[in-house]
């Protein structure tokens, strides 16, 4: 089996590339390195370039037969998407259409798509299942929802089978410390908490006046290696089953920001210096996934998504980062 992985030098994409390679899948990573890292591509072939470049896609997809495309490449910063929506519609929608057209033209039959919990917007209930209304409240979520809708339409019209995964809070790093999370700038809670410990410099807790058990926001953290496995199971599923499918991926357990700080202190043995700050605009109080559908349909079972395991892997990575 052979797959093209766009954004395979990025955080989730690089873990997925490794996982697929371990399963004996041949991979070609296509990444322009605008935010990914060449060192993160530990397996398969690497092509540096833009996933929206039709000429390049024709060359890559025309050279050999691909069984599927796993599409990670995207812009993902919520605040930036609100300030610069044009950039997000161009990359996450227009270029994705180019990629889909190339897939159809070259007879690629299976497409696995990185979506997001941001497609749901403000939760109307938790845990959030796949039937929850989809009303994104920022351009990032809107572009990902359009991606899902394009897949459904391309599926009906051109027979492209697909599987979209709505990640909740991707976290953790490879269990052997080889690859990990390296966003620049980093906005995510867990790396910032651990860096605050390492540097003995205060991080900010964005709001302790939410209607939650300790006033800070509750999120569902899911290990990046568990996400990688879901992509493999998703691809296998659409190779055996027709249609266009979407799954929520989370641990189905919620931890507050302050609980993460305390768990981090237990893992590192170090205090996490922090200040209480104002709410960050656009943060819902609680986001927790129902992962029942992924479990029931794909047989997915998160293995490393306990918060202690995530924090242990992340602590190891933060202390011994390779890039
Ligand atoms: N958060 C925080 N301080 C930070 C970064 C994040 O208090 O420096 C909070 C943020 O407000 C949210 C949670 O941690 O409630 C998770 O945020 P993150 O950016 O990691 O993921 P998101 O839920 O936005 O996808």
Image (cartoon, rainbow, N blue to C red):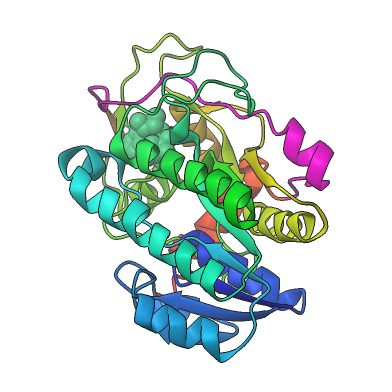
Question: What segment is highlighted magenta in the picture?
Answer: 277-303
Between residues 253 and 97, which one lies in front from this camera angle?
97
Residue 290 quadrant:
top right
View extreme (left): residue = 83
Residue 7 quadrant:
bottom left
Image quadrant where one finds the N terminus = bottom right
Q: Name the residue located 48 percent from the left edge and 21 percent from the top edge.
A: 286
Q: Quick check: can you spot residue 272?
A: no
Q: Name the residue located 83 percent from the left edge and 37 percent from the top edge.
A: 296
Residue 168 point in image, percent of width and height: 53, 38
Q: Relative to 244, does residue 2 appear above or below in the rendering?
A: below
Residue 149 point in image, percent of width and height: 49, 41
Q: Name the residue located 42 percent from the left edge and 62 percent from the top edge.
A: 73
Whether 299 is among the magenta residues is: yes
Q: Name the residue located 27 percent from the left edge and 50 percent from the top edge.
A: 88
- Number of disc labels: 0
Image quadrant where one finds the C terminus = bottom left
View extreme (top): residue = 211
Q: Main secondary structure of the magenta part?
A: loop
Residue 102 point in image, percent of width and height: 47, 71
Between residues 196 and 171, which one lies in front from this camera angle?
171
Residue 244 point in image, percent of width and height: 65, 46
282 with respect to 64 (left or right): left
């Amino acid at each position: 089996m052979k797959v093209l992985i766009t954004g395979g030098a990025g955080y989730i994409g690089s873990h997925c590339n490794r996982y697929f390679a371990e399963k004996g899948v041949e991979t070609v990573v296509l990444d322009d390195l605008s935010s990914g890292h060449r060192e993160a591509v530990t397996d398969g072939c690497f092509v540096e370039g833009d996933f929206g470049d039709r000429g390049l896609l024709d060359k890559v997809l025309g050279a050999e037969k691909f069984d599927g495309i796993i599409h990670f490449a995207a812009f993902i910063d919520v605040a930036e998407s609100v300030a610069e929506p044009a950039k997000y519609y161009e990359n996450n929608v227009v270029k994705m259409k180019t990629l889909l057209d190339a897939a159809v033209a070259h007879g690629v039959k299976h497409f696995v798509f990185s979506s997001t919990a941001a497609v749901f917007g403000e939760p109307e209930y938790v845990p959030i299942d796949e039937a929850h209304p989809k009303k994104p409240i920022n351009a990032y979520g809107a572009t990902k929802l359009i991606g899902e809708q394009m897949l459904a339409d391309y599926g009906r019209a051109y027979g492209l089978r697909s599987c979209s995964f709505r990640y909740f809070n991707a976290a953790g790093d490879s269990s052997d410390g080889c690859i990990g999370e390296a966003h620049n700038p980093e906005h995510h809670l867990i790396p910032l908490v651990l860096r605050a410990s390492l540097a003995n410099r205060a991080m900010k807790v964005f709001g302790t006046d939410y209607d939650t058990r300790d006033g800070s926001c509750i999120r569902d953290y899911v290990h990046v290696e568990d996400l990688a496995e879901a992509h493999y199971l998703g691809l296998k599923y659409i190779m055996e089953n027709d249609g266009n499918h979407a799954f929520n991926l989370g641990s189905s357990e919620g931890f507050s920001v302050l609980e993460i700080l305390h768990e981090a202190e237990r893992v590192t043995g170090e205090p996490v210096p922090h200040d209480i700050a104002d709410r960050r605009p656009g943060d819902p109080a609680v986001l927790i996934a129902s992962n029942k559908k992924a479990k029931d349909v794909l047989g997915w079972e998160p293995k490393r998504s306990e918060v202690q395991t995530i924090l242990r892997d992340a602590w190891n990575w933060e202390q011994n980062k390779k890039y």
